[in-house]
Image: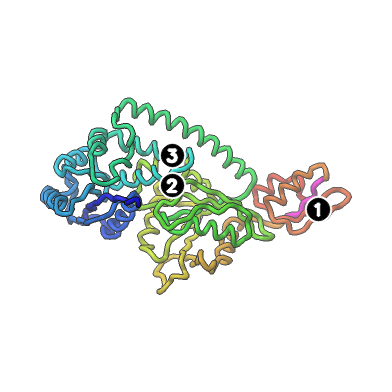
Amino acid sequence: MVVNIMDQAILVGLEIETNTLSIKSNLDELEQLALAVNIKTKDKVVQKVHAISPKYYIGKGKVEEIKKTIEILDVDVIIFDDTLSPSQLANLEETLDVQVIDRSFLILSIFAERAQTKQAMLEVSLAQKIYMLPRLSGIGKSLSRQGGGSYNAKGPGETKLELDRRKLLTEISNIKTQLATIEKERDISNKKRKDSQIPIVALVGYTNAGKSSLMNGLTTYLDQEQDLVFEKDMLFATLDTKSRRIQQTNKPPFILIDTVGFISKLPHELVRSFQTTLLDVLNADLLLHIVDSTGNYTEEMNVTKNVLRQIEANSIERILVMTKKDLAFKPLELDEDYIYISNKTKENYDELIQAIYGHIYHDRRITDLLIPFTDGQIYARLKETTTIIQNQYLDTGIYVSAVLSPEQINIYQKYIIKK
């Protein structure tokens, strides 16, 4: 029988008078993040302050209090809800004599475990190294500590304790070069999508809000013969962008993209490193903002909106989609329009699909074309990228009545029948 040994942790957060965020929900979320890397929370410590302590982040008295609690509860690691400065990390490690990490380190560790594709692994590695750069000595001590659990083997740089600054800078440069190559390849792919005039719809939202479930739900609901994406009730179940070609019967297609989930206090290193992935959001014609109606939906909505502002995607059209209607026990209290769905029962899927088409094809109009038989590939492209209302084979070519976008009208101008 294999016994799964879990590290024991104390979570620490500050309730700052100038900050309106809920410290309770933040620490509850931090507990789930810790659990994702096999760390069990033994206690949560909250201190109310006017300002952050430059030396310890928390007050010296609270540090001494935590030190006594460590001995009583026999914990292995202290996790802070905010990003610690290099000096705070070093001072806390020296005083508490246990492994000390912060929220950013924890999230980076989860991402390191979940990354599957080359791009995701490169982006996570870059974020880790950017995070480590100013904290070399502190992280070196942290990783070298011998604890009773398993977490000490999981942090960024786990196989490289010789954290040399010059070597780290070289590795950062090399990773950026590799990601630039991947970005060029994605640019070519995105250009092909734009040229095909197929609109892009991106799923955005808090991690574990139901984005992958919705993608799978729409795929099966519309009888699309495609592989389903991985979904599981866990934070950051997938980091890799997935795309599916979705098409309702007798309607034009669109590309549905499932993006990496957002979270409160997302490390800046991750936002910068995941620029290639986040470009999928910036290139979208429409965003489906997915929110779990059974959670702290107001706060989670605000987190996603803040990240969208951070990456300058807040001007893209957005539909708010609330999930888990099948578990609803009371009306939602929201100040904006939304579509309330159930990925389990598919309730209101038709309403959502209608709303998607209403947004991405609102500027299209019915256009008549006459395509010579010698340009048969044009007719094939129209069938793939537009809605064909009527077609007829004439002596002079193929008559087509199709729903075209303004861009497509320009592209196929020479085939359009003037009336």
Q: Which comes before the other along the chain, label 3 or label 2?
A: 3
Q: Residue at x 78, y 55 (%)?
A: 419
The stretch in magenta equals 367-372
Report the predominant secondary structure element of the magenta stretch: strand
Q: Which residue is mark 1?
A: 399
Q: Which residue is mark 2?
A: 312
In the image, which is nearer the foreground, mark 1 or mark 3? Answer: 3
Disc 1 secondary structure class: strand
Q: Is residue 370 magenta?
A: yes
Disc 3 secondary structure class: helix
Please, is residue 303 above or below residue 338 in the view?
Answer: above
Real-space Cα distance between discs 2 and 1?
43 Å
Q: Residue at x 51, y 46 (%)?
A: 280
Q: Residues within 10 Å of mark 1 (few under 14, many from 20)?
A: many
Q: Residue at x 21, y 41 (%)?
A: 89
Going by the numbered disc 2, the residue's amino acid type is Glu
Going by the numbered disc 3, the residue's amino acid type is Met
Left or right: 20 in relation to 246: left
Left or right: 343 in relation to 403: left
Please, is residue 315 above or below residue 173 in the view?
Answer: below
